[in-house]
Image (cartoon, rainbow, N blue to C red):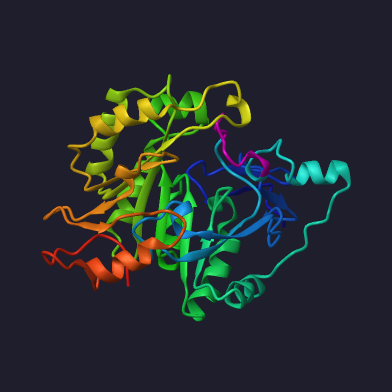
Amino acid sequence: MINDILNCDFCYRMCSIPEGSRGACGAREHKEGRLQTIGYGRVLTAAVDPVEKKPFFHIFPGEKTLSISLYGCNFRCDFCQNSEVSQPDGFYSPDYEHAAGLRSVPEISPERIVEIMRQKNLNIMCYTYSDPIVWQDYMIDTARYVKKAGGYNLMVTNGSFSPTSLERVLPHIDGFNVDVKGDDQFYKSVCKGSLSPVLSSIERIAKDPRSVLEVTTMIIEGIHTVEGIRELGQRLHESGVEVWHLSRFFPHYRMEDRAATSEVFLARILEAVKDSPIPHIYAGNSINLKHEKTICPVCGATLINSHSYRGEARYDVARTMKEGSCTSCGTPVYGLFT
């Protein structure tokens, strides 16, 4: 007997999906009595990126990663920076392809995409661009092959797991970068999502000794406030965050008419959080190189002078850190460096 309704546990929404329908993400479908991920194996984007571009500053800085994505996201952020592969009206959405008669994206098995990674002499796979939460079955299948090959898995995500899906994902992922977009009202009005499950996920990841956690907040001038970001930083600290990227917004998707966040406003934000108990805070999409250095939180020694995309970080780590600790004072530094 085919069940009329099936429950998806991939994200916090826990969608109840009738036969022939999809969940809120548009990527999970109830078909012939089971839940399926639309476009499983159809890798829409694949690129070799510096790991700092994701951004990861505390996971093998100076190395490169194979970054891949499938279709879909369970949020509807007006400022989405990758709407082409994540939003229902994006060029790559299955509905668009069906309507346009485009079925040109071939399926790539998890084993094959890992072979490609190794052929490029890479040791890191990053699941990114769209949100891997909604295609976590392909991600986990791929991550297993990465581990068998001796590699590492990184995930860039909005962090809105269900508790069961996070426990399913945790054993396979070495590093998470979770987007924390704003306060509760910001999530409701701009993202059509919720902050609470994101903070719950962050708390769980931060406690897991197998994974490194970094958090990114995109600062939108005229929406975010200095006080709001300061309060958000306190909540992140209480959740166990040790690495926080504050990144400038650039107009995209449904916010194309909004001006890019100015360097002046980002500098005000950074000044406001400089005394935050979060030990490592960085500027993103900024010309302010002062805020891309990695500093020892105890003795103040500069451990990594530059997180540019040219690989200088590898030289700095070899010179200033030993087995993940500051060579000046011996303090262990949060992250994966060796």
Query: Residue 131 at x, y = what percent?
Result: 55, 48
Q: Main secondary structure of the magenta part?
A: loop
Q: Is residue 183 visible?
A: no
Give the residue drawn at x 51%, y 31%: 191
Report the span colored magenta: 76-84
Give the residue drawn at x 26%, y 69%: 319
Query: Residue 136 at x, y = what percent?
Result: 55, 58
* 241 displayed left or right of 283: left
* 94 displayed left or right of 14: right
Magenta stretch containing residue 162, yes or no?
no
Say which quadrant the N terminus sits in.
Answer: bottom right
Q: Looking at the image, is 336 positioned above or below residue 201?
A: below
| Displayed quadrant of residue 89 | top right
Magenta stretch containing residue 79, yes or no?
yes
Q: Looking at the image, is 208 positioned above or below residue 191?
A: below
Q: Looking at the image, is 316 positioned above or below residue 188?
A: below
* 102 displayed left or right of 337: right
Give the residue drawn at x 30%, y 24%: 226
In-front residue for pair 102/8: 102
In-front residue for pair 32/128: 128
Query: Residue 168 at x, y = what percent?
Result: 45, 62
